[in-house]
Amino acid sequence: MRRVGRVVAAAAVTMSMVVAATAPAVADDGAGLLTVVVDKDCSQVAADDCDFARPWVTVEDADGTVHGSGWLFDGTWTPSDGVEAENEFSVDGLQPGDYFVTVRDEADDAVAADHVPVTVGNGSQLLRVAYQPQPSASVTVRVTGIDGDVWGIGDAYLEAPDGTVRADYWGTSSADVYTFRTRVFGQWRLRIDADAGQVGYLPTYYPGVADADAAELIDITPGAQLALSMDALPGGRITGRIDGPALDPQFARGVTLYTTDGRHAYDTPAWPDGTGGEYVISGRSLDRAGIAPGSYLVKFEGGEGFASRYYDGADGSLSMAGAKPVTLVGGEITENVDVALTACGSISGRVTGLDQWPQMTLWGISATNLDDDTSSRSGWRDEDGEFKITGLAPGRYSVSAGGHSYDPKISATYYSGGDTTSGKTVTVESCGSAVTGADIAVTMTNTARPTLSGPPAVGTAISVKPGTWNVPNATYAYTWLRDGAAIQGATSSSYRPVAADAGHQLSARITARHVDYRDATSTTTSAKVLPGPAPRATSAPTIGGSAKVGSLLTATQGRWSTSGVTVRFQWLRSGRAIPGASTSSYRVSTSDVGARLSVKVTATKSGYTSASTTTGSTAVVPKVKPTVTGTPAATTIRRTTTPKVAVTVKATGVRAPVGTVTVKVGTTTKKVSLTASNKGKVVVSLPRKRGPRTYPVVVTFTPSSTAAKYLTGASARAHSIKVV
């Protein structure tokens, strides 16, 4: 979402809203534009209070997603598009819907508009907020210290009762008087940080206490003029002597204070004064506050070649375990905290593999004491890669090189005898030990990540590009990964995904190798393996056989572009699946009469997309014409004998034709129903005939209305009966 226009400052306590159908700007991306205009009324406050107000505008949707937020500025600048937008805040590209606007003064938390609903369409919407700043309050604090000794006041802070800092001020100060203006109203704790002075002062809460819970709250209201006074709390001071060879100015670097349980407390400046190694500690080095009363372990940081030592009441201890606590009292001086610094052990070696980084500036070398981290030291390698770290107390060390480069891609940490995650232990036995050969081989670095040649799919070969490395002439080893685990045997630069890969994440890990460097690895972004491409029917399946009831049809599977496919058949009647007809052959039934038959052939293979093709259709399956026979029981009979005719009706593919059999002997006709129980056979008896005479016999079959859907009518061959 892009911000357009901008806004002008003010602080709010009253508001009114007007939503209009137009705005002074037009959405530039085809969606809605919402403009919030703040109408500020500064008639009741001074001009600088008006300018001091800092409202913040937030536009969010019903789910709480913020679509735009920002300050209202003072209108002294012009947007890059050249359109003045004083007192305005606009958000464009909003999708049509309901939004909520909040205008809140960040200084005093006054709310000018609280979650005001606005409906945005495809055009522009305008929300106006009336807004009146409150007058600021003035706070003047007079701070005094020991015998009036305060060099100046650094900062003032307003804290909530829970300790949250609500605001900090620089204000104006003159000696021990500090004045600041604020629009942070309510009840707050006031904290003052005084300059160090002669003894160093602690952060002090009004009315002059160190404990925040003991502080008194001050009530700040609009327009108030508060005049406060308080005493600054003095810290402690340490003096003593640092001795070293001929008072070499390089032998001491400063002092670090630790709590008696070993936690870091203060870093302090403490340099010999050049007249015998005397020093004074009266404040911390990172700010102007003094050192709080209490007990501390005092560590004197040794310079080049000199081991750091802890105050122990004698010449100094090389370890924290031998330190003697020093007690500081507020406003008092703790004297005779002395130490003697002496040269101690060293570790030297060479960093190799730097020739590939001509833009490298310096490499810092660190010796980390694994038994007492406070005894760790550091140094630099020279232009040939050589380094020597001195002033090391006895102990076990991990030696590492840290990079400083114009290119952050090649900034890393490398360890002696190990890789970038672990290091070989180097032991300094005593202050006279000089350990050599702590060499560091710099690991190769991947500057452009390896990439896959394309989206992976089952059955299609994919390759990996090894990316770019900082070392030329490197060789590469490849490991293909399925869901982050190595695929057995997949160790070349290309890989053809198999069915087991389908739906899983595929990536490739590159291991770069060079004789002068440690191996390094980099892995491609993983990609989901897609199913293999659907097979194509290179030769269409066909149907063999006659499309007649009772006939057996057989389908071929055709030929497919992908080997090893499994083929399924589904016979279709007029395009619809025939239940149970799912083999390569099919016997035509009476249900098929009047329809065309075809076969849908589906080719499947594990890991691949399935594909189907359908054969051409057969001719329409015709109705079955039965075969009818009508045979007289006897062709010559006496006139006293009853004529009988045996009738048989057969239809291919029909087990029991159903209909009516009509037998005509001479002029006499008799009809008999042929049911399924007759199984196509019936004997018809007719009345006796006079003789002597020969009578023609005519037999016909007419199918029932149901059977007529698949059967036609039929007649038997003519016969005769002779009556004597």
Image (spheres, rainbow, N blue to C red):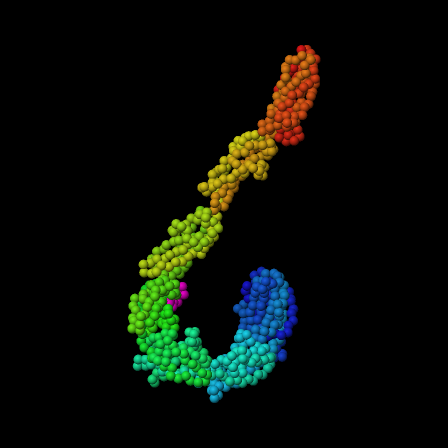
- x, y (%) of residue 722? 65, 13
- Up the image or down, 194 lies above or below 690; here it is below
Q: Nearer the viewer, residue 565 or 426?
A: 426
Asked if residue 279 can be seen in this view, the reply is: no
Q: Nearer the viewer, residue 34 or 627?
A: 627
- x, y (%) of residue 30? 58, 60
Q: Nearer the viewer, residue 179 or 301?
A: 301
**Name of the residue lying farthest toward the bottom:** 147
Judge from the rendering whether residue 423 lies leftward or rightward of residue 209; answer left or right: left
- x, y (%) of residue 493? 39, 52
Asked if residue 456 can be seen in this view, the reply is: yes
Residue beneath the point at 64% across and 74% down: 14
- Up the image or down, 344 lies above or below 26; here it is below
**Rendered image quadrant of residue 253:** bottom left
**Rendered image quadrant of residue 105:** bottom right
Span colored in magenta: 401-409
- x, y (%) of residue 701? 65, 24
